[in-house]
Image (tube, coloured by chain):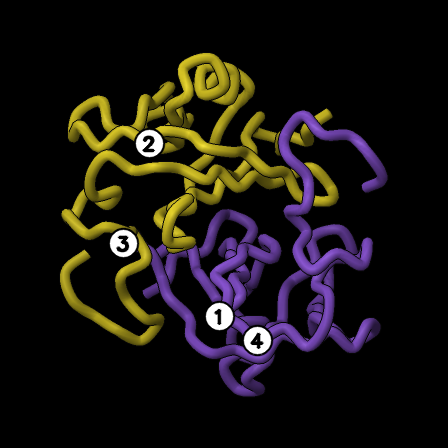
Chain colours: A yellow, B purple
Amino acid sequence: MLRFDQNGLIPAIIQDASTGEVLMLGYMNAESLRRTLESGQVWFYSRSRQELWHKGATSGSFLNVKAILKDCDEDALVAKVEPLGPVCHTGNRSCFYRTLDEDGPS
Amino acid sequence: MLRFDQNGLIPAIIQDASTGEVLMLGYMNAESLRRTLESGQVWFYSRSRQELWHKGATSGSFLNVKAILKDCDEDALVAKVEPLGPVCHTGNRSCFYRTLDEDGPS
């Protein structure tokens, strides 16, 4: 039903279920989506490491899933989550912590 | 500075600036981003039509840009917008109007 792209991936927008803040954009393949649904925590497919990625496995900042939405043409997801810690590897609550023209540490 | 993908695109999450609702996921190339910044309204690059797309040009539901954020690794954007009408071609306010397991007209 879902439309995965030519690499077998679908983008998943991660949104804080309580505040509505967009926390990050990740990518899932069919298996990571299956694990997400089964475990109730977000699993991605890491494009850089080319492996399944249980978000929070190293940081402890797991993402507990409250709801998953799909878009009209079924090629994008929104996961509403309760984050158990900062989502960004920088320690920020969200990966989207800078405006477009803003520099600074990434 | 921004990292566009191998097709010259960057995903842009469109979020209602007032309510926080995620409205859609679109893709921008460098030119559509330039036009977005210049005009203050969202321009995408349509992957299916392979052309620049002034969102709202046919429906009237233009997206007035309030802020644009980039993520930590600079390969995704969030545009906070004021939508001038329903964003989805189905007439729904958001393209994300169904849960993952929900069927119905797309």
Estimate how packed mark 4 is, as few (under 14), some (14 to 19) or many (20 or more) residues with alpha carbons within 10 Å: some
Which label number is shown at residue B72?
Answer: 3
Quadrant where the N terminus of chain B lies?
Answer: bottom left
Are circles 4 and 3 on residues that touch, CB within 8 Å? no
Q: Earlier in the sequence, mark 4 or mark 1?
A: 1
Which label number is shown at residue A1?
Answer: none
Which of the chains bears the disc numbered 4? Answer: B
Question: Residue B71: percent from the left, percent from the top?
Answer: 33, 56
The amino acid sitting under disc 3 is Cys
Are circles 4 and 1 on residues that touch, CB within 8 Å? yes
The amino acid sitting under disc 4 is Glu
Res B72 → quadrant: bottom left
Quadrant where the C terminus of chain B lies?
Answer: top right
Given residues B13 and B45, the one toward you in this image is: B13
Residue found farthest to the bottom? B39
Q: Badge 4 is on which residue?
A: B82
Question: Residue A31: percent from the left, percent from the top?
Answer: 50, 15
Query: What whole-number distance in Å separates the C-alpha atoms at marks 4 and 1?
Result: 6 Å
Is residue B28 toward the left or the right of residue B91 in the image? left
- The answer to whether residue A30 is above or below residue B84 is above
Q: Earlier in the sequence, mark 4 or mark 3?
A: 3
Residue B9 visible in the displayed image: no
Label 4 residue SS: strand
Query: What whole-number distance in Å separates the C-alpha atoms at marks 2 and 4?
Result: 29 Å
Residue found farthest to the front? A18
Are circles 2 and 1 on residues that touch, CB within 8 Å? no
